[in-house]
Amino acid sequence: MTDAPEDEVLATVSASIGRRILGIGLLALLAVIVIWMAVTKSPAFGWQIFLIGLGITALMIADAMRRSTACVLELTTTMLREKDGRIIARIDEITDVERGAFAFKPSNGFLLTTSTRGSRAWRPGVWWRMGRKIGIGGMLPGRQTKFMSEIIAVRLAEREAR
């Protein structure tokens, strides 16, 4: 490894405005259609309540996606973090990177396995964590996530070679 400063940014990933508009817009459209169906064409009161609840949930997820896709992920020499400072994973805790077509990973992304368990977290369209698994991707561009995963894989290979 090189003697780089601890907070030197090696790669960044962020959702493009087009992906954000399309993803958030489609979720909002789904919410509007479901609520409209509940108000105008509902067969029974129970279905009306269910459809309104589903529409409100879709609106809440669209808002969560709007907020989460505004963040930028940074890979530094020591960690993977959000630009605002929230640490997703430390490089020395990462044990594996899965990038294959058959890996259980977000679209356009990759899956990290860490040596320690973390608390569950979800940033819709950007990343999620369940235990030792961290999925990066979704609304993020594949070219940027592939570059980031390759840097992490090289770091892991260098660490294992020592």
Image: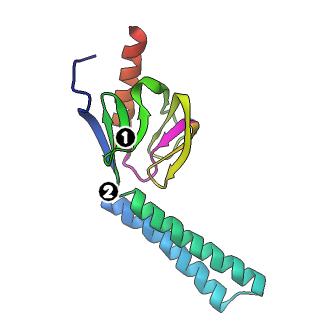
- In depth, the one of 119 and 143 nearer the eye is 119
**What residue range appears in magenta?**
132-143
Q: Which residue is mark 2?
A: 16
Corner quadrant of residue 33:
bottom right
* Residue 14 x/y as whole percent: 33, 50
| Residue 127 drawn in magenta | no
The residue that appears at 64% across and 80% down in the rendered structure is 52
127 on left or right of 37: left
Which residue extends farthest top?
162
**Position above or below: 118 against 46:** above
Q: Secondary structure at mark 2?
A: loop
Q: For marks 2 and 1, give the CA distance.
A: 18 Å
- In depth, the one of 49 and 39 nearer the eye is 49
Amino acid marked by disc 1: Arg
- In depth, the one of 152 and 60 nearer the eye is 60
The residue that appears at 40% across and 9% down in the rendered structure is 161
Query: How is the model colour-coded?
Result: rainbow
* Residue 151 x/y as whole percent: 34, 28
Q: Secondary structure at mark 1?
A: strand
* Residue 44 x/y as whole percent: 78, 87
In which quadrant is the C terminus drawn?
top left
Question: In the drawing, what numbered circle is on residue 13?
Answer: none
**Position above or below: 68 against 156:** below
- In depth, the one of 11 and 37 nearer the eye is 11
The residue that appears at 40% across and 27% down in the rendered structure is 91
136 on left or right of 58: left
Question: In the drawing, what numbered circle is on residue 81?
Answer: 1
